[in-house]
Amino acid sequence: MSEMRKVEAIIRPMKLEEVKLALSEAGFVSMTVTEVRGRGLQKGLVQQWRGREYCVDLLPKTKIEVVVPEKDEDQVVDLIRNTAATDNIGDGKIFVMPVLRTIRIRTGEKDEEAL
């Protein structure tokens, strides 16, 4: 039984379709996508509305979660990074963590068979 990894990427919402397509074309079709809000180095934006300035410090982002065998971890990370990058502050982050067990609810399959 090989180890599995959860690759979690926080990206710009406008990059979701490109990243989803790149992952799918490489054979990684299972994913969870969530709309989230967050901030990092860019610390938000100062905007004006009706003559007043206000700070939007939690910006809309998209979180993609993909569970893959350990051997595919680098490929998935590289695909996401290369596709999501705009070379500007606010492009996001990628986190990789171990997955101890995976169980498909419908069939009871476990680990890699459950992906």
Image (tube, helix red, strand yellow):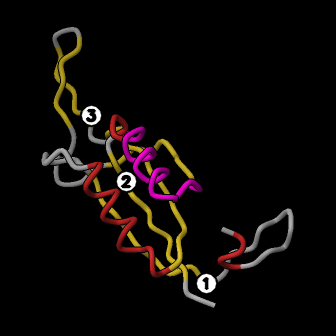
User: Which mark sits nearer the N-terminus, 3 or 1?
Assistant: 3
> What distance separates the C-alpha of mark 3 from that of mark 1?
38 Å
Does the magenta-highlighted stretch encompass residue 93?
A: no
Figure quadrant of the N terminus:
bottom right
Report the front residue among 25 and 10: 25
Report the front residue among 112 and 101: 112
Q: Residue flagged by tag 2: what amino acid is it?
A: Ile
The disc at residue 10 is 2
Q: Secondary structure at mark 2?
A: strand
Residue occupying the point 39% across, 58% down:
9
Report the front residue among 83 and 41: 83
Looking at the image, residue 82 sits to the left or right of residue 46; the answer is right
Residues packed near mark 2 inside 10 Å, few (<14), some (14 to 19) or many (20 plus):
many
Does the magenta-highlighted stretch encompass residue 23?
A: yes
Residue occupying the point 19% across, 34% down:
45
> What distance separates the C-alpha of mark 2 from that of mark 1?
22 Å
Residue 31, position in %: x, y? Answer: 56, 55
The disc at residue 100 is 1
Instruction: Specify the segment rendered in magenta.
Output: 16-31
Report the front residue among 23 and 13: 23
Residue occupying the point 51% across, 58% down:
27
Q: Label 3 belongs to which residue?
A: 56
Quadrant location of residue 81? bottom left
Residue at far bottom of view: 1
Residue 97, position in %: x, y? Answer: 45, 77
> What distance separates the C-alpha of mark 3 from that of mark 2?
18 Å
Looking at the image, residue 7 sits to the left or right of residue 38; the answer is right
Q: Label the magenta part by its dominant secondary structure.
A: helix
Residue occupying the point 52% across, 46% down:
34
Q: Residue flagged by tag 3: what amino acid is it?
A: Val
